[in-house]
Image (spheres, rainbow, N blue to C red):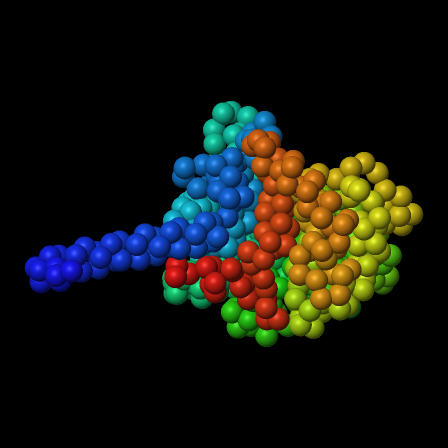
Amino acid sequence: MAPAPRRARTAASRWLLGLSLLVTAVSFATAARAAMDECAWPAWQRFKALYVSDDGRVVDASTPQHITVSEGQAYALTFALIANDPAAFANILAWTQNNLARGSIASALPAWKWGRAADGQWTVLDVNSASDADLWLSYALSEAGRLWKRPEYTALARAVSDRILTDEVALIPGLGPTLLPGPQGFVKDEVWRLNASYLPIQVLRVVGKQGGNALWDDVLKSSLQVILASAPRGYAADWIGYRQSEGFITDTVTSGVGSYDAIRVYLWAGMLPDTDSFAKTLDAQLRPMRSFALQHAVPPESVDTATLASRGEGLPGFSAALVPLMSHAVPGAHGPQSTAAQSYRERAESLALKSDQHYYSDALTLFGLGFSDGRFRFDRNGHLEPRWNAPCHAP
């Protein structure tokens, strides 16, 4: 057979080359979309749709005042960072500054509660700040500055850190510099009221280090003491008291019950890496709660930390909050490996993010299941390791 004319062969070659380039482009686009899908966090998108207003306010619609708490703003900032969502982060931060911090968190810690007042006005309902929110706020800003290379966020984080030391840390005789739940209302008749769930060790490590004040080392030490004392039999109390002459005592207001606050003690501890110097101590202290969870289909709503009597069924977010701690029961496990942990995970997944009426439970779910999915980790120094920072870049 006679060879094809040169012009015909050239046209065919060009066509094949074009087809090859088209296939390559389609393959690249498909891979890029797959990477984006892998990096996307549907739970965050759903949380945002349910709870975050267009102007960046996290709304608890289950309350008559449709309140916003500073904790919710700080959690949402953390979720936005984990999800690599800088636009949402900036929006949430702007609302927080403008409405809770008189325009600048560099000069004022955010008020903890905002909503619709009795006269119908939308305004601050309680000017007292909440130190757990302030810690997470400083942390999210610090890590956003580092991961997104945004020095303005780093500067804000340091300002918040310094103000926490000034406004919310007290020198308690016999205990040392200690983080109070807020500036006002937590000491009376020489008894300090403390809350272990306000003291996530990984967050304290970063906030203290980026603040650069050596006093944070003492706050970290006292924080460990508070957490351990809150759970003498392995079940954390929501609140605990401290009196110099007696040391730690049962809180007279809550009588040592552990419930909606205390669930976060297990969550924060469960997310500590094994390389954290406090991890083994906390894991051993909280082992009774982990054992309870592994033997029961549903976590309790509350536990009397003196008698260990439990009541009720915890929110779906309680189940999610315990999954990281439960995974420690399987040596070398990463995620919900045991049947019980998987059951807790399935309960949380099936009941979470259904409506805008369960802000707190759903926030716990994003933390607990996001961690167990490997969407983020903390290193030994407390730094956030989001999944998008490594394998989730576009190919």
Residue at 91% in and 47% down: 307
Residue 2 sits above or below residue 369 on the image: below
Q: As rendered, which of 192 and 340 lies closer to the eye?
A: 340
Q: As rendered, which of 333 and 360 lies closer to the eye?
A: 333
Residue 118, quarter of the rendered image: top right
Q: Is residue 380 left or right of residue 173?
A: left
Q: As rendered, which of 284 and 140 lies closer to the eye?
A: 284
Q: Is residue 79 left or right of residue 237?
A: left
Q: As rendered, which of 6 and 341 lies closer to the eye?
A: 6
In the rendered view of the protein, which quadrant contains the N terminus? bottom left
Q: Position of residue 226 (x, y in %)?
A: 75, 61
Residue at 47% in and 32% down: 122
Residue at 55% in and 66% down: 383
Q: Residue 204, can we see it?
A: no
Q: Residue 50, can we see it?
A: yes
Residue at 82% in and 59% down: 287
Q: Is residue 204 left or right of residue 332?
A: left
Q: Position of residue 267 (x, y in %)?
A: 68, 54
